[in-house]
Amino acid sequence: RARRCAMTYIVGVQRDVPTPISEPIRELTPRSISLGIALALILGAANAYLGLYAGLTVSASIPAAVISMAILRILGGSTILENNVVQTIASAGEAVAAGAIFTFPALVILGGVRTLPYVEVTALCVVGATMGALLVVFLRRAYVVEERLPFPEGVACAQVLRAADAQANVRPLVIGGLLSAALKALQDVAGAIPGAVSGARWVGGAAVAGSIDISAALLGVGYIIGIRIAALVFAGGAFAWLVAIPVLTALHGGDGAGNAAATAQQLWSGQVRYLGVGAMLTGGVVTLWKLRTRIASAIADSIRVVRSSQAVATAREDTDLSARAVLTAVALCVPVVFAICVGLSGDVALSAVLAILLTLICLFATAIAGYLTGIVGASNNPVSGVTVIVLLAVALFLKLVGVSPSVGPQLAILSGAIVCTAAAMAGDSMHDLATGFHVGATPRSLEIGVLIGAIASSFLMAPILNLLIAGYGIAGTATARAGALAAPQAFLMAKVTQGVFHGGLPLGTIATGAILAAMLGFSDRYLERIGSQWRTPIMPAAIGLYLPFGLSVAIFIGALAHSFFGPDDEAESGPGILLAAGLVAGEALMGVASGAMVTLGVRLPIF
């Protein structure tokens, strides 16, 4: 311990609370790995459903930490570091799910496949997850130790791990899960409660439509993300549905004679939701510009570490995987990408260039995602915004080099899937490394643990996605059933690539969305300069522009509930937050179960 404190003083780091650790250290143990993998698979499946349904995922770290403490306390002999490894492995499932659900379902939307290919999906998930989990090793010291970014969820998770009474924390999580699972069962299995309430009417020549989703999970999401982010999501949705659609129908000569709801839905699907595309593009560019110095510094640090031939003695809390191990694992991913690209395109030279290019892009994506999660938290990591920029650039590149329209969109989607998974995993991994920093964990153990969880979850993603698509279908496709999944980000990816290769992108609407986002960016800059607590980041509003309005309304109501009924200073480990996390998890898991029932031939709803 004296050596550890001395090394901490030397590197100029003072942790919040020194953690007394007895030897031998129980950290990366067989039972922590087994429990972590089990939770990673469960939470990954739950977030896959939530992401396809609402376009949002939430961090699984805090629920995983609470569950881990409860189980390991029963088994006996656990340590805070062992609990930390469990939540680190478990949270990897959520990150892999985010990368997968935002991209792979686009292949179904494009009409190329009805069932996602297991080998390709699994291989690309493994590749993206490996790059995202390991490339952040070069960024850990810069972001966590030297810059001391806030990492809100990382600090909160550390507080949960320090909590002495795990059983008191488990209760609201379980109650929330049971309530939301029961509501979802009444909706999907019994058919007793509708999934949403909506209405539309003509006001003169303008179609005005609105809706609200009856969803405990969305209420939980709103409670977790808070009023500031939820208000922006709601504002984006309100602008799209209550301003843009009525104005456009009036300008295009709406006569008030047709079906107002169908007119509004058609206009939103074909035109208005592309405001969100433009806004996300602008948001991604702004993010890259803000992080230009950090990215350059991180790359310089990585090059310096790799070139260094001297072994540096470090304390256990400062020991990472070696640069050689990281680079070897990343290098092994390149031929996998190459093989998949060759199998799809048949062009060896193009596949080689694409494999190398995607590896370099993943480095930038992990730097961006790692920094963003340090500022806004893992749940608010705008992975889809970064991915859509990459997807658009790759699609344009493939079209310029002459790739056929029958192959190009699929190749672009698979390329985007790698980057999306890497970015999601990087944000999650950096968050876990921040948690480990505050509890005195060994970074090397966490880096190994998150890689184990990511790879294990990757093998489950294709079956889970196919299960959900078969059970619910995707709205707007031939597979759609009652209560079909919106899959907003996947639709975005599909429409962007389809527009590049086949035309039909509403460029004027995209440009308008970009201008609106730029205005938000200037507003955010001004609010930052005057020190305002309210800010206007671009990505939440862009998501609101793109999501169905009912989702935005439900999320906003959940955030209002937090403002009115939750304590002003409620911690991430507070009972309200844990109840909200249970609402999200319960509905998501019941959604997966309903999909399994339909796949097995059960006709839903039963009544």
Image: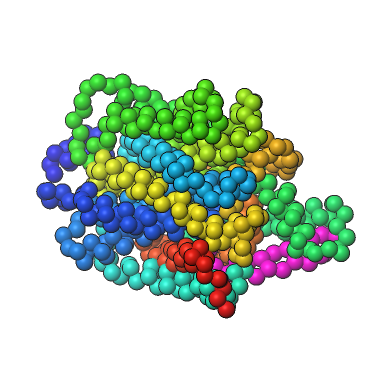
The way the protein has been coloured in the rendering is rainbow
Kindly identify the residue that appears in the image at 31 percent across and 26 percent down: 305
How would you classify the magenta stretch by its main secondary structure? strand
- Say left or right for 81 vs 276: left
- Say left or right for 30 vs 129: left
Kindly identify the residue that appears in the image at 12 percent across and 48 percent down: 24
Write the start and end of the magenta stretch as one range.
197-218
Quadrant, the N terminus: top left
Quadrant, the C terminus: bottom right
Q: Is residue 133 found inside the magenta-colored segment of the image?
A: no
Residue 504 pos. (x, y %): 73, 40
Kindly identify the residue that appears in the image at 19 percent across and 58 percent down: 78
Q: Is residue 208 found inside the magenta-colored segment of the image?
A: yes
Indicate whether 161 appears above or below 496.
below
Numbered-mark total: 0
| Image quadrant assignment for residue 43 | bottom left
In the orientation shown, which residue stands out farthest toward the front? 601
Residue 217 pos. (x, y %): 50, 64
Residue 114 pos. (x, y %): 57, 51
Kindly identify the residue that appears in the image at 32 percent across and 57 percent down: 38
* Residue in front for this viewpoint, 414 or 574: 414
| Image quadrant assignment for residue 580 | bottom left
| Image quadrant assignment for residue 204 | bottom right
Residue 433 pos. (x, y %): 32, 44
- Say left or right for 53 vs 177: right
Q: Judge whether residue 241 can be spotted in this image.
A: yes
Q: Judge whether residue 515 can be spotted in this image.
A: no
